[in-house]
Amino acid sequence: MRRGLIAFDRLAAFVIGVLLIAAGAAALAWRFAIIAGDRVELDGLTDVPQQDWWPWATGAGGVLLVFLGLSWLVKHLPRRGTGQLNLTGSDETGRLTADANAAASTAGKVLDQDGSSSTVANWSPSSRRRWSPTPTSPPYGPQLNTPRTNCTASSVATPSTTG
């Protein structure tokens, strides 16, 4: 999640929490006669549902709440990939970035060049819920020790050795 969304969620939870605590404190104060009055008068409020505009206002409020709820849910969906990563070495002359999605895609292609991309996870109760992936094929495919000469402008650096 993005920082702004996390900050908004925390602020909204704080405001709702304060309002609920205040409502509970007011109810307790009224119960124990700290707040004066035996009854709450709501004379004007009982006539509101009979007004001509009431169904339209209720419907508009419901549609607004559904829209806000759906947009809140969509904003909380996990994003696929990482996007741009800032690299060390950036200064006032320029910013160094790397496209993490392209790097992950190219790494997946390199790992899958031998036609097998399956990984086995080893787990036992004694391993305290740690798992270690065990590739069922050579880690970087058969091209690990061969120089890569077919790089294109859109490809990302892959593990290779020359020599």
Image (spheres, grey):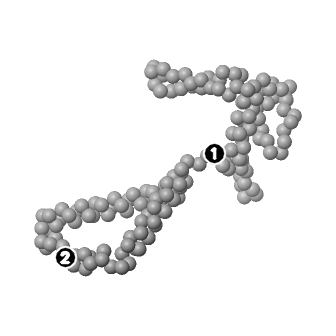
Q: Amino acid at mark 1?
A: Gly
Percent of width and height locating residue 162: 84, 28
Tell me if residue 7 comes above or below residue 157 in the rendering: below
Q: Position of residue 45 (x, y in %)?
A: 26, 76
- Residue 48 in picture, x, y percent from top left: 30, 77
Residue 36 in sight in this render: no
Q: In the picture shown, does residue 153 fall above or below 32?
A: above
Between 118 and 37, the residue placed more toward the observer is 118
Q: Earlier in the sequence, mark 2 or mark 1?
A: 2
Q: Secondary structure at mark 2?
A: loop
Q: How many marks?
A: 2
Residue 10 location (% of width, % of height): 43, 56
Q: Nearer the viewer, residue 73 or 121?
A: 73
Judging by the rendered image, the residue that carries numbered circle 2 is: 41
Q: Is residue 92 left or right of residue 24?
A: right
Q: Residues within 10 Å of mark 2 (few under 14, many from 20)?
A: few
Would you call the spot at circle 1 few (<14 residues within 10 Å), some (14-19), or many (20 or more)? Answer: few
Q: Amino acid at mark 2?
A: Glu
In front of the other: label 2 or label 1? 2
Residue 81 numbered mark, or none: 1
Does 73 sit left or right of 42 as displayed?
A: right
Q: Which of the image's four quarters has the C terminus? A: top right
Look at 49% across and 54% down and name the residue there.
Answer: 73
* Callout 1 secondary element: loop
Q: What label sits on residue 35 in the rendered view?
A: none
Residue at the spot 12% in from the left edge and 64% down from the top edge:
32
Asked if residue 137 shows in the view, the reply is yes
